Amino acid sequence: MNPACGELLVAGVDEAGRGPLAGPVVAAAVILDPGRPVAGLADSKALTPARRAELAEEIRSWALAWAVAAASVEEIDRLNILQASLLAMSRAVAGLDPAPVQALIDGNQLPRLQCAARAIVRGDATEPAISAASILAKVARDAEMCALDAVYPGYDFARHKGYPTVQHLAALEQHGVSPVHRRSFAPVRRILVARRAGD
């Protein structure tokens, strides 16, 4: 297939990590190759970690283009999680080569892009390119949280990936707030306020 055929250059875009209390929010953008379909694409949350890893490898090998980008904890706290997610999406789409003529965005909000865009609620379950993006974003973010677990071992980031599990909340109470926790999120903010009050 000739990538110059612009009508085929449609990117799927999704993010991972809006709900966690720690770590970046990560987005991916993928332009699938119609001539090399990836079988088994689905919303990343519906797949096992092993299956996500397998599919991510196929997507990276077979897609016409893919890119992963993030917004940092500092950006999340400064902008809010929605705007940081849209920023990560914009960065992911900007990283595509060739550039898409249209982007299909999971959800109901559109990031600022240099191409046409359409928001699709639950698109990660219905649009293969968005499913592919959700898989790459989830795999990349999980890897980042495992790396952060090695730096901040007391929080067990490799297990819960920063989500507000009972174990994570207990670790926050015990160890306090790490540099990679989102200070604008209520459970983290409560601990900061309580610790300041106790000083």
Image: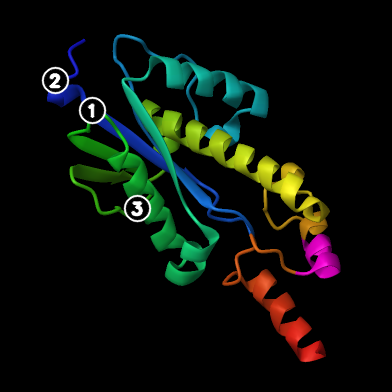
Label 3 – label 2 distance at C-alpha: 29 Å
From the viewer's side, name the closer residue of 7 and 196.
196
Residue 164: give x, y in percent of width and height. Answer: 70, 58
- Residue denoted by label 2: 4
SS at mark 2 in the image = loop
Answer left or right for 168 relative to 7: right
| Above or below, 71 relative to 194 | above
Furthest-front residue in view?
151
Mark linked to residue 56: none
> Is mark 1 in CB contact (under 8 Å) with mark 2?
yes
The quarter of the image holding the C terminus is bottom right
Q: Amino acid at mark 1?
A: Pro
Answer left or right for 74 relative to 185: left
From the viewer's side, name the closer residue of 51 and 26.
26
Furthest-right residue in view?
174
From the viewer's side, name the closer residue of 20 and 153.
153
Answer left or right for 138 relative to 156: left
Label 1 – label 2 distance at C-alpha: 8 Å
Q: Amino acid at mark 2?
A: Ala
Mark linked to residue 108: 3
| Above or below, 198 relative to 68 | below
Magenta residues (range): 169-176
Q: Amino acid at mark 3?
A: Asn
First-in-chain label (3 vs 1): 1
First-in-chain label (3 vs 2): 2
Residue 149: give x, y in percent of width and height. Answer: 73, 47
Answer left or right for 188 relative to 75: right
> Is mark 3 in CB contact (under 8 Å) with mark 2?
no
- Residue denoted by label 1: 98
